[in-house]
Image (tube, helix red, strand yellow):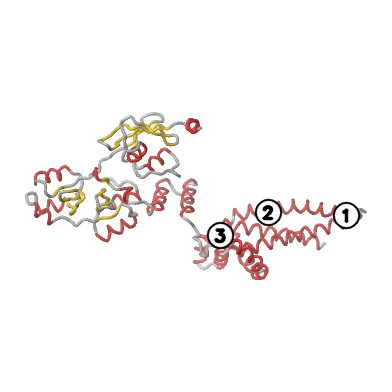
Amino acid sequence: MWPYIAIVVMIVLSAFFSGSEIAFNTSNKLRLKKRAEAGEKTAAMAYRISENFTTALSTILIGNNLVNLGASAITTVITVNLLLALGLGKGSDTLASLIATFVMTIIILIFGEIVPKVLGKQHADVVVRWVAYPIRILTIILYPVIFIIMLPVNLLRRLWGKDNGGEQPTVTEEDLSSIIDTVEEEGVIDEDKSELLQSTLTFKDTTVEEIMTPRIDLVTIDINDEPEVISGTIEKSRFSRIPVYEDSIDNIIGVLYLNHYYKNAVRENKAALHDILIPPCFIHKTMRLPAALNVLREKQTHLAIVIDEFGGTLGIVTMEDILEELVGDIWDESDEVVDMITKTGESTYEVNGDMNIDDLFEYLDIPSKGFECDYSTVGGWAIEALNADPHIGDTFSYKNLLVVVSGMDDMRVTKVMVLVKPPEEEDEDEE
């Protein structure tokens, strides 16, 4: 009777090891860490094991192989005895081995691998807490064997450059992005919350050049202009802050706050206008948004002048521009509503040249992986694609998009028409 009991024990142990392996690989480390911090001992042990799972994995694999070999050996003994009892003594060892191998392969595959792994994956967070202490005890018992086995493993890791020599992050940025997409698809959060969370991931990689108001669109004042010219510019402006330069827009000397202007009534006095200017804040075009936000906060200002490597004025960026990268468009009474993209046909769109290229690709569901462009706007993309010599009616293609220049202001592309071709048509063009 004992051989049959031993086989059952071996299969149960095989299920234990298989389920433990998949559970540790799929468990949520963040939830384990939270439970551990709350004082749950089993969760603390499970989290400790998961942080150094290589050693535990060695324990699991050694244990699983030992019990599987043991189960096969015992089954072979049982089969030999059965064959002898049936009078099949000659050649019974070979036949018994074949039968035992076939039977145990089926049994272990179903009850020692598939079933425990399915259950272990479905209930990973629970399973790892159940098996944490047994795995830890077995690791201590088998440590001499594990140490010997890990010597060549660690050597190979170093030879292949896989030994990073430091702790790896529990969750990477790509993991977070994937998690956000998954929970949105499962209905845990809505699209707006998902976009907000995704924005926080890309925020740190965005430069001020990508979101600034370009030089050509700036409303500015030359302090040497006549008072009536300055007053006219101010009265026509819908902005509350206007950069002021002297002689050249590359020589910004300050920022005029319109409330200061009206409060001090300096319409007829250039000297007084100079006195109420706020010192300009300059930031380089390559500065990332988090750093730019910190600069604006430290300077206690809402507007910064974006400069290039030569110190020339490229544009401006405001606190509102930066925050909009996180929370989306922020509208106030002074904002002019401009449709960046308008659908004009079944597969045609009219696109504003100032639209961000990434926003266009996202709107049209075009993968942007591998796309390279020195500009961040559709108009700049068109200029680059047409070798800096665009004309109305010029066309260029990208993947399944046909882009036609439909509006220009001097050498600036202000509007394009985009035709989205069917995927099969795109494939034919590539061929």
Q: Secondary structure at mark 2?
A: helix
Point 55% across, 60% down: residue:
161
Residue 92: mark: 1
Q: Position of residue 360 (x, y in %)?
A: 38, 40
The Cα–Cα distance between marks 2 and 1, rounded to whole angstroms, is 29 Å
- Category of crowding for the residue at label 2, using alpha-carbon neighbours closer than 10 angstroms: few (below 14), some (14–19), many (at least 20): some
* Residue at mark 3: 162
> Which three-letter amino acid code belongs to the residue tagged 3?
Lys
Disc 1 and disc 3: Cα gap in Å? 48 Å
Residue 176 image position (x, y, % from top left):
47, 53
Amino acid type indicated by mark 1:
Ser
Cα separation, mark 2 vs mark 3, equals: 29 Å
Instruction: State the image quarter where residue 344 is shown.
Output: top left
Q: Earlier in the sequence, mark 1 or mark 3?
A: 1
Foreground: 44 or 200?
200
Looking at this view, name the residue that lies furthest to the left. 268
Q: How dense is the environment of label 3, judged by Cα within 10 Å: few (below 14), some, or many (20 and up)?
A: few
In the orientation shown, which residue stands out farthest toward the right? 87
Q: Mark 1 near mark 3, Cβ–Cβ under 8 Å? A: no
Which element is circle 1 on? helix
Q: Amino acid at mark 2?
A: Glu
Residue at 75% across, 52% down:
105
